[in-house]
Amino acid sequence: MKPKVCVLRAAGTNCDAETAHAFRLVGAEAETFHVNRLREAPKRLRDFQILAVPGGFSYGDDVASGRIFANELMTSLRDELLAFVDRGGFVIGICNGFQVLVKSGLLPRLDGQAAQQATLTDNTSGVYQDRWVKCTGTAGKCAWIADAAEVELPVAHAEGRFAASDAVLDRLEAAGQLCLRYSSGTCHNGSARDVAGICDTTGRVFGLMPHPERFLRWENHPRWTREPRRTEGDGVRFFRAAVAKLA
């Protein structure tokens, strides 16, 4: 059977359709859910194997990016979300979704604690960054990363700088949870240790600032007419890796 994906959106989310399409492209069955629908019937989450929190500007990024959405999830859906992960569910948070997962405590969730242990804050440049970046993944720990190949993906954020205490960073480093990094010399936002994405201790919960759902076709790339054609965009690999483990 096809793995079922819940793409969760809220006011201000704007990448839900692209994220759902990415999952369908690799053989999953994706459904877009407004958070209010899930709040009305939290047990609906039990119908899914994958939860995706897509990018955008949830609730206008008031207070801080992802903060209101994170608070909403952990006040209304905390038990179901934790149970979803603990029974083997896969989760991905992209850009604003990554901010939501970190500020809700679903990432990195060291020692099983669903409390905020890191943050994503203002870029050191002080400006919104909209560009393409190169990243390298670490295969092994994260279920969403198949290999260590360098990929190129678009970013679009003002609060993408990953920050945590040295103690937390050291633990994440040792455990292989700093699983996606900007390639050497290309970190544009000042993230600690060039972090572009992290996973939890299970490897099934993954958050990243770049947008894999925006590079599914070679034609999405800004240099698609000037470079040798590729069969697909680099973003596909993340969705395929996770879905393959559930198919």
Image (cartoon, grey):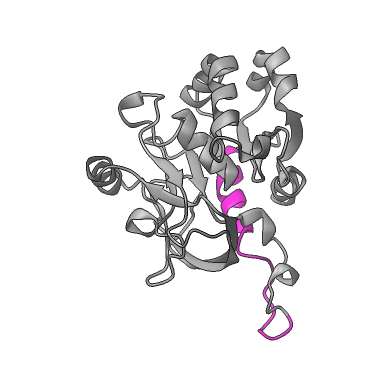
Of 44 and 73, nearer the camera is 73
**Span colored in magenta:** 225-247
Of 214 and 23, nearer the camera is 214
Q: Is residue 118 above or below residue 85?
A: below
At horizontal 40% and vertical 52% (from top left) the residue drawn is: 179
Q: Is residue 18 above or below residue 36?
A: below
Judge left or right: residue 220 versus residue 184: right
Judge left or right: residue 96 versus residue 187: right
Of 116 and 42, nearer the camera is 116
Judge left or right: residue 107 versus residue 222: left
Q: Residue 240: horizontal and vertical position, in percent?
A: 61, 51
Of 55 and 202, nearer the camera is 55
Q: Which of the 4 image quarters holds residue 172?
A: top left
- Specify the quadrant that holds the N terminus: top right
Query: Looking at the image, can residue 247 be seen?
Result: no
Q: Which of the 4 image quarters holds residue 44?
A: top right
Query: Looking at the image, can residue 125 be seen?
Result: yes
Q: Residue 60: horizontal and vertical position, in percent?
A: 67, 39
Q: Is residue 157 above or below residue 222?
A: above
Q: Residue 216: horizontal and vertical position, in percent?
A: 69, 60
- How many marks are shown on the rendered structure? 0
At horizontal 71% and vertical 47% (from top left) the residue drawn is: 15
Q: Residue 66: horizontal and vertical position, in percent?
A: 56, 37
- Specify the quadrant that holds the C terminus: top right
Q: Is residue 242 magenta?
A: yes
Judge left or right: residue 168 versus residue 183: left
